Image (cartoon, rainbow, N blue to C red):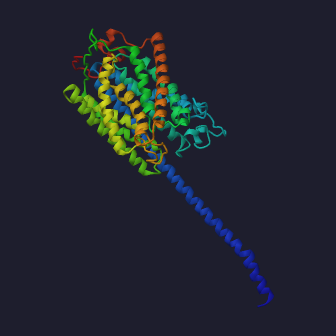
Amino acid sequence: MNRKLILSILIITVIVLPLIGEEMNSQITSELTSKLEAIETVKVGMDTLWVMIAAFLVFFMNLGFAMVESGLCRAKNTVNILAKNFIVFAIASISFWIIGFGLMFGDGNLFAGLKGLFFVKGADNSPAVADAYSGVYSALNWTGVPLFAKFFFQLVFAGTAATIVSGAVAERIKFHAFIIFAAVLVGIMYPITGHWIWGGGWLARLGFFDFAGSTVVHSVGGWAALAGVILLGARSGKYSTDGTPKPIMGHNMSMVTLGGLVLWFGWFGFNPGSTMSVGDGSVIAHVAVTTNTAAAASIISATVSSWIFQKKPDLSMIINGALAGLVAITAPCAFVSVGSAAIIGLIAGFFAVIAVFTWDKLKIDDPVGALSVHLVNGIFGTLAIGLFAEDGITGTATGNGLFFGGGLKLLGIQALGTGAVAVFTFAGAFILWLILKIIIGIRVSKDEELKGLDLGEHGGEAYSGFQILN
């Protein structure tokens, strides 16, 4: 072999082949990158689809609340209650968009978000609405769905908190007073306590857990409602002179039943949807089963309790029993076993029934049982994490609850958070209701109340042409 041939082979070996290999490596790397990007795009798309479907289910719960509340009240107030439930989501949408979302999830301090109000530009000067990862909403960067998907999902939760208030103050609240209160609740009060827990605030730093909102949504709505009920007073004729409560029956239990089933259905968006990802289907399935199990156990418990205390199984108690179990499992659904969920449901159903009688003894008039369902069981469900949590049961490091060898640490943190939210929300709501009472009045006249708010507040009837006896 001559020197020229050897030299040519060496040149090919040393120079040409590496160049060919580099080009091939570059091509392979490019193809792999493209495929990984495509996989990520599909994943984000699937996650987004799941989050939006869950949000639509939660939005559908507005119908359930409207039917339950109107059915449990008298026919002469049906239009008023339906109008409140219809407009409240519109008020919530604008209020949460303008300021609430930023206060809740914007970067700020341990008390409230200070950036991202009105969806202003992010810290890197890119539009916050298009910047889901490096903008001003760091508390939501754990999920990769587009920012507007995150916003809409959180919006339907915020609207639920205001809807809870509607039922408790039914049959004597001025329409415009409720609208103003709902706007402030969703725009300011709800987001601040929400920031403490879901927005990276001080309770989150302490290790407070609330997976889908027993406190963030339900207790907040319950405390706000309780303040309003106290300042409004009871409905005319609800209590005799000696304080004995008189039953004021709802006018359409078929509507209540349908509404209850709508809410039960919608809760499968409320709780499983809070995963905000389809990455681990086992978590979604676990949450769905704990949610359903708690609801079922609570229905049985409420039915038995009602049968014992009222001598008959009251349908309204049965339906509210389902809702009580759903509220109670909302916080711990991803942190407890299915067996624990059943126990939580059994306790919740009993609490729902007992609470109705307790509120009546205190002369706290709640026409639909919202306080018994959302406030009482929102508190219980939050504390249940400290009792029944099993560390890492769905991958979250919560620590164990009291009944699983964790001692009092987690229960203490849950109690602290529950108390802090209670004080802030009740005090803020009471002050707001009081201001409204002084400035514009919050209760309709006695004559209007007796004739019905449908005619007095809206000039129309739900059942025109029918003789209404109550």
Q: Is residue 331 visible?
A: no
In this view, which residue lies farthest toward the left? 311
Relative to 90, 103 lies left or right: right
Image quadrant in which the N terminus is located = bottom right
Residue 257: x, y in percent?
27, 32
Question: So how many labels did they put on this image?
Answer: 0
Which image quadrant for residue 220? Answer: top left
Image position of 50 with respect to 198: above or below: below
Q: Who's the residue at 49% across and 45% down the image?
A: 397
Q: Who's the residue at 67% across and 71% down the image?
A: 21
Image position of 276 with respect to 251: above or below: below
Relative to 237, 331 lies left or right: right
Task: Please name whichever residue, 204 or 258, is drawn nearer the observer in this view of the structure.
Answer: 204
Which image quadrant for residue 386? Answer: top left
Task: Please name whichever residue, 121 or 249, is drawn nearer the observer in this view of the structure.
Answer: 249
Residue 93: x, y in percent?
48, 30
Q: Who's the residue at 25% across and 21% down the image?
A: 249
In this view, which residue lies farthest toward the right? 3
Image position of 96 with respect to 233: above or below: below
Q: Is residue 65 visible?
A: yes
Relative to 432, 121 lies left or right: right
Image position of 470 with respect to 317: above or below: above
Residue 448: x, y in percent?
33, 11
Which image quadrant for residue 383? Answer: top left
Residue 384: x, y in percent?
40, 36
Image quadrant in which the C terminus is located = top left
